[in-house]
Image (cartoon, coloured by chain):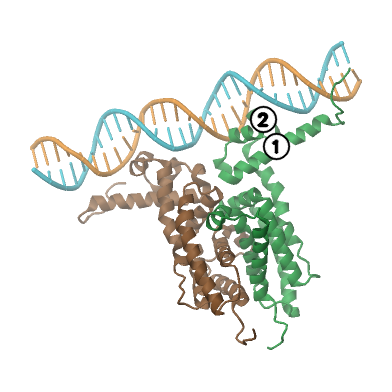
Chain colours: A green, B brown, C cyan, D orange
Amino acid sequence: MTSITPAAPTGHRAAASEARKQRIRDAALALFSQFGLRGASLDAIADQAGVSKTNLLYYFPSKEKLYVAVLQQILDTWLEPIRAIDAEQSPETAIGDYIRIKVELSRDHVQASRLFCLEMIQGAPLLREDLQSKLRLLVEEKSRVIEGWIARGSLLPVDPHHLIYLLWGTTQHYADFAVQIEAISGKTLADPAFFEATVENITRIVLGGLLPRTNADG
Amino acid sequence: MTSITPAAPTGHRAAASEARKQRIRDAALALFSQFGLRGASLDAIADQAGVSKTNLLYYFPSKEKLYVAVLQQILDTWLEPIRAIDAEQSPETAIGDYIRIKVELSRDHVQASRLFCLEMIQGAPLLREDLQSKLRLLVEEKSRVIEGWIARGSLLPVDPHHLIYLLWGTTQHYADFAVQIEAISGKTLADPAFFEATVENITRIVLGGLLPRTNADG
DNA sequence: TCCTTTCCAGACCAATTGGTCCGGTGGCTT
DNA sequence: AAGCCACCGGACCAATTGGTCTGGAAAGGA
């Protein structure tokens, strides 16, 4: 048996298989994020992934399963920035880092951001449980961190929930409404200067409004 | 539909016709805003509007025409709040009013907000021209107003574009991500207390960061 | 070597899609 | 009264949809 495979490692098959699955997931993300679950067709996804529709359905038994697989893969990535908020940090560092990481996500994972947004708009039929359990707990936990800062006097009084929504909404906006932003300003987050200006301005507005003045005046 | 009204006034026909068109537009908005252009079917829209699909296609010759009609109807409403920003006002009043009106929009026109968002996510194939002309000019004009405030010293330095994006994104978020917000906090903008808290918190964060301290210091 | 398991694609299917055709109905003018 | 015409719906159509079936190629263990 002279196999002519060029230095193929063991599990060559499994590796190729996983690569194929990932190609399919990528194509699915691209199309789902643009047209939604109903709007994207399996034919189009298979076509973009470079596989036959039959082969797609071999790896993912149904359209919905594929959709969930894609969604599940991005959910954790999506909650990471807020998870990173730490009570030990100063609010300045924590919020500043959060904004930067979240804008980076909007720059590097536009499609994921949009798919997430689409799912929300649709009423999150497939994510509702995760939202009401995981995300809710997470926000509750971080709210307590923010309240701790306020109690310590290192942050001016503000409803933690609304602060989180503001941060989330603002940063998300740069991915979901990228077309509008580009139409207006001609800039994209891919432009490093524009990226920095974005982070800088959001940070200044938010922290400027919430950080207490060093000059204690009462 | 049998026997519309007993005592029909003159123009009964034209009025009924217009009412029908509006019913169709409403149904279309509901379904397009949830499933997108491709995801919503004419059958479903006609069904929800209480008319036959044939009748729908009598008033709107194609699916895309119907979509554009719906979109066009909400675009002006959508740009109204930013149009209202006036150089004569103080930034405090102007921005405060803007936030309130925009949150009202998110409360009273959830579907319109979402359809707008969907169109953006898709790349705004049918609105791109409007964006690059009308919206761009509008934002340019209002940016100059904001720059005027900054020059007068009644607003701290900030990039007007990013300020507008932040306001837009934050307020929009309460409509588009209403499901997520409800899953987390259990509240809706329909709850007057939550509505007021929303306006109040956004306003405080934004204006708190941008309004100069009364104590002139340089 | 043989044989089982994994992998893959073409033909095919029922349901749904956007849209057309045709035959009507009923209000309004003459 | 009569006829014109805006208005409306059922039947229908070709294309597309998500998904199945069948049959074969290609590993990989025995």
Please state the horizontal and vertical placement of residue B104, each as a whole percent of the image: 49, 67
Residue A137 appears in the figure: no
User: Earlier along the polypeptide chain: callout 2 or callout 1?
Assistant: 1
The residue that appears at 88% across and 18% down in the rendered structure is A2
Q: Mark 2 highlights which residue? A: A51
Relative to B18, does residue B214 appear above or below in the rendering? below
Please state the horizontal and vertical placement of residue A122, each as a whole percent of the image: 56, 51
The kind of residue tagged 1 is: Arg
Please state the horizontal and vertical placement of residue B27, each as a whole percent of the image: 42, 50
The kind of residue tagged 2 is: Val
Q: Mark 1 highlights which residue? A: A23
Q: Chain of mark 1?
A: A
Q: Chain of mark 2?
A: A
Residue B149 appears in the figure: yes
Q: Are marks 2 and 1 in contact (CB under 8 Å)?
A: yes
10 Å neighbourhood of mark 2: few (<14), some, or many (≥20)?
Answer: some
Relative to B138, does residue B204 appear above or below in the rendering? below
